[in-house]
């Protein structure tokens, strides 16, 4: 570790981005709910729904990705992590992006995308430097996914600038598809590994299939093809059939990971439950397209709030416990956080038949992230306790 005598918040990459990613998830949801009831008008150039979609997918998830990568890359490469004022400057770039988009209606058109895109571009350059310096070539795929995610954000800005409904545009689908692939790739590594470690500590003889076997790679290759098809032709019947096949393959992949053996530890089973939203979302989208459904927002939220929301929160809680020296087990507050977010993801599916339930979903979302801030914020703000001699 590099020596750092300043605020503990900037002593490791996960600290500012996990904490304030959660803070933004709360603030953005409060603003969204306020616009729904007509209390406020946001000073953004984006259409209301587009702002909501962007700030969850590229704003919130962008922060969590930064916190994860800045914490994981030193483990991958054996190099020292970024700390201190350089980390604070990168964090300030992310904050500037959120402010610029919120007040984009008062700024020249090209200023907002320039400020917002500066953050992922700088983050990508930093990660590339570390991977090259550490000769950690196997993780270039993660950097490639970050590059596609940044391209998707650029396309989202373009669609919003030319007057399109960016919330249902090419950029959002590409960004969401990339997020799903990130979960499939990174989750496919960590879920079997964490499950195996927990089963071994629990003296349970069951073992998950090792990560990234031939079947896993086949599922990932097929998933890339299907997601590209969905991005390009989202409403074609062929796309619907392909999405159903993709969902079945991911269920088959997950069955090999011994999820049913982990029910005693929420820190482990939540990872399996979060991953299950990938096949659920794929099948829901596929069925919607095959039967000619009128809208896909509900099915997409199985990926957005379900897969992305629950997996990021699961990783944030687990990483915070591990890197701040706390016991690696979920307490009641953590379990409540998980259940609230699962409730939000499922409640969102019923808005087409009961519009008011969107407020229930929003309140459950707020409860989950406020719970994270209250339960984990103090540990993120304080130095890690020194090990006793």
Image (spheres, grey):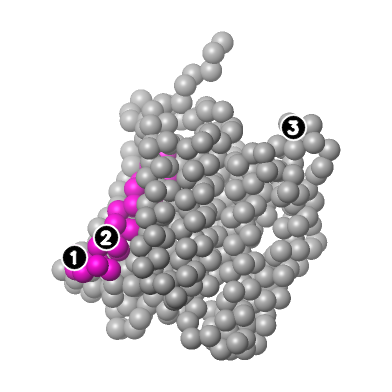
Q: Residue at x 28, y 75 (%)?
A: 47
- Is 18 a magenta residue? yes
In the rendered structure, which disc, 2 or 3, sits on the residue that comes first in sequence?
Answer: 2
Q: Secondary structure at mark 3?
A: loop
Few, some or many C-alpha atoms within 10 Å of disc 2 (few <14, some 14-19, many ≥20)?
Answer: some
Query: Which residue, given by chain and number where applicable, does mark 3 sit on?
Result: 202
**In the picture, residue 225 is in which quadrant?**
bottom right
- Is 285 a magenta residue? no
The image position of residue 35, as x and y in percent, is 25, 67
Q: Is residue 130 left or right of residue 254?
A: left
Residue that protrudes farthest toward the top in the picture: 389
The image position of residue 298, as x and y in percent, is 48, 72
Q: Main secondary structure of the magenta part?
A: helix
CA distance for labels 1 and 2: 8 Å
76 shown above or below 154: above
Query: Which residue, given by chain and number where applicable, does mark 2 sit on?
Result: 31
Residue that protrudes farthest toward the left in the picture: 106
- Which range of residues does the magenta coloring cover? 15-43
389 shown above or below 264: above
Q: Nearer the viewer, residue 229 or 132?
A: 229
């Amino acid at each position: 570790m590099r020596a750092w005598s300043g605020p503990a918040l900037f002593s490791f990459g996960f600290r500012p981005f996990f904490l304030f990613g959660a803070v933004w998830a709360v603030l953005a949801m409060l603003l969204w709910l306020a616009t729904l009831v007509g209390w406020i008008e946001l000073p953004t150039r984006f259409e209301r729904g587009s702002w909501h979609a962007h700030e969850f997918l590229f704003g919130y998830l962008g922060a969590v990705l930064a916190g994860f990568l800045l914490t994981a890359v030193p483990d991958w490469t054996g190099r020292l992590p970024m700390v201190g004022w350089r980390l604070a400057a990168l964090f300030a770039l992310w904050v500037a992006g959120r402010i610029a988009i919120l007040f984009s209606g008062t700024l020249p058109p090209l200023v907002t995308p320039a400020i917002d895109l500066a953050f992922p571009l700088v983050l990508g350059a930093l990660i590339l430097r570390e991977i090259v310096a550490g000769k950690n070539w196997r993780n270039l795929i993660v950097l490639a996914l970050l590059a596609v995610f940044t391209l998707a954000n650029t396309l989202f800005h373009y669609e919003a600038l030319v007057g399109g409904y960016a919330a249902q545009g090419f950029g959002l689908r590409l960004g969401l598809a990339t997020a799903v692939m990130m979960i499939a790739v990174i989750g496919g590594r960590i879920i079997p590994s964490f499950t195996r470690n927990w089963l071994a500590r629990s003296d349970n003889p069951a073992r998950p299939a090792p990560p990234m076997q031939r079947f896993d790679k086949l599922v990932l290759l097929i998933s890339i093809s299907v997601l590209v098809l969905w991005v390009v032709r989202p409403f074609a019947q062929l796309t619907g059939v392909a999405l159903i096949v993709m969902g079945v393959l991911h269920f088959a992949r997950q069955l090999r990971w011994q999820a049913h053996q982990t029910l005693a530890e929420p820190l482990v089973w939540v990872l399996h439950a979060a991953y299950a939203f990938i096949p659920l979302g794929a099948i829901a989208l596929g069925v919607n397209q095959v039967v000619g459904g009128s809208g896909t927002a509900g099915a997409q939220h199985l990926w957005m709030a379900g897969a992305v929301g629950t997996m990021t929160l699961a990783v944030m809680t687990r990483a915070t416990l591990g890197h701040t020296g706390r016991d690696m087990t979920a307490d009641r507050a953590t379990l409540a956080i998980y259940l609230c977010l699962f409730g939000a993801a499922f409640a969102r599916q019923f808005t087409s038949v009961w519009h008011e339930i969107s407020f229930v979903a929003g309140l459950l979302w707020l409860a989950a992230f406020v719970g994270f801030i209250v339960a984990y914020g103090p540990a993120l703000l304080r130095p890690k306790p020194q090990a006793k001699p």
